[in-house]
Image: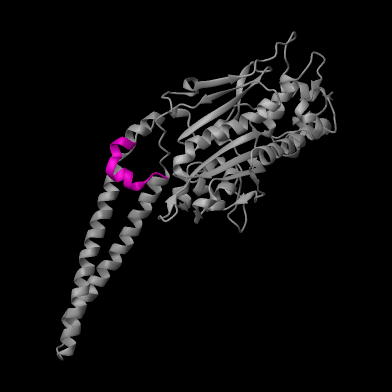
Amino acid sequence: MLDPKRLRTDIEVVAGRLRLRAMELDVVRFQTLEEQRRQIQTETESLQAERNRGSREIGKLRAQGVNTDAPMQRMQVINDRLAGLAQQLQEVQNDLEQYLLSLPNLPHDSVPAGQSEADNVEVRRIGVPKPMAFKAKDHVDLGEAMGLLDAEVAVKLTGSRFTVLKAGLARMHRALIQFMLDIHTQDHGYEEVYVPYLVNADSLRGTGQLPKFANDLFKLAGDKPYYLIPTAEVPVTNLVRDTILDEADLPRRYVCHTPCFRSEAGSYGRDTRGMIRQHQFEKVELVHMVRPEDSYAALEVLTGHAEAILQRLELPYRVVSLCGTDLGFSSAKTYDLEVWLPGQEKYREISSCSNFEDFQARRMQARWRPAGGKPELLHTLNGSALAVGRTLVAILENYQDEGGRVAIPTALQPYMSGMRVLE
């Protein structure tokens, strides 16, 4: 959530930053609601002062034995008006809150301008795609030919955009999760957490999924208003909701593996083949809570930790800085990691690493206390390190040979009892 004080004092600056997202801020609506709020509060304060004076006057009259019916009637009128104003103020504040909840984060000054993902800026490119003396197959053809990937039976079990993995491929999927968790906990110093896969609406509101992306969520029917998590970011970031951390507790770095569930309501017809865009998939997620002055350095560190997985798996990739119109709703700045897929002959996203600044913390009231100071809002960050299914796709396509076999990356072999090939 944006700082309402900044909207009151610098609304034109805010509007200018939001134009980088191709969004035109409804300035009139905000100013109208603010004026209503001010008028109600001014009248409320005036009536409260009058009521206080009246109460003192009634006390004096009673002490003198004077009849107080008339001033008491006036007090009742004031009380009735104050009750009505309180209801009006609540309605206006609710409208203001909904307005603020609908606004995305402001892009950081370093975010490039642009109209679409075509305007994202490449920051660096690591590794060179391996030349192949044959036409590369995509992961679906490879997996189906080996009898290790079955989308048809998944349709029978559930529906489209689900996949069944078998034997060595299922084992590699599990191995990737363990490999990623070990690297991030043992080499990068993250604290591993296990969290619920169901969350309440407050948690989703805290990280920015609600109310904006309600249609992308799977909501459970039943007595409890629970949602399946779209990403571990939601429960892990909310660990510090309504919390004040001491400065000595920062930074906090969490790693968490969970399944993720998304309806993909806004991506109809995109990537319907294979494992690129599924309703259910696995991720290993990194979450940072840091002091505001440390958050952009933390973004570089977090991105480097996600890159380390790709480097150890020897997968060629590139890092791009997203332009304003391609930024996620809550993000102030995002780096996407895009891995090379020979079957598609292009780079595809495998991780997003974002700094949300205090946008999520304001929604969650997640704060920290400087030594000897007053509580301040935290800065939060998160990134996939990595999306497991897409990593599996990248290994299948980059490590294939002409005979349709797939070599297992050296770094992953200890997690697969020394297996070297899928076939």
Extreme residue toward the bottom, this view: 65
Residue 265 placement: quadrant: top right
Residue 133 placement: quadrant: top right
Say if the magenta span includes residue 339. Answer: no
Classify 397 as above or below 192.
above
* Of 295 and 362, the residue lying toward us: 295
* Of 22 and 240, the residue lying toward us: 240
Locate residue 417 relative to residue 21 in the image: left or right. right
- Total of numbered circles in the picture? 0
Residue 271 placed where, x, y %? 62, 26
Extreme residue toward the top, this view: 133
Residue 412 placement: quadrant: top right
Q: Residue at x 62, y 32 (%)?
A: 306
Residue 174 placed where, x, y %? 76, 37
* Position of the N terminus by quadrant: top left
Classify 150 as above or below 133.
below
* Magenta span dominant secondary structure: helix
Q: Residue at x 65, y 44 (%)?
A: 256
Residue 274 visible at all: no
Colour scheme: one colour
* Of 324 and 318, the residue lying toward us: 318
Q: Residue at x 19, y 76 (%)?
A: 54
Residue bounds of the magenta highlight: 1-14
Locate residue 208 relative to residue 229 in the image: left or right. left
* Position of the C terminus by quadrant: top right
Residue 43 visible at all: yes
Residue 42 placed where, x, y %? 22, 59
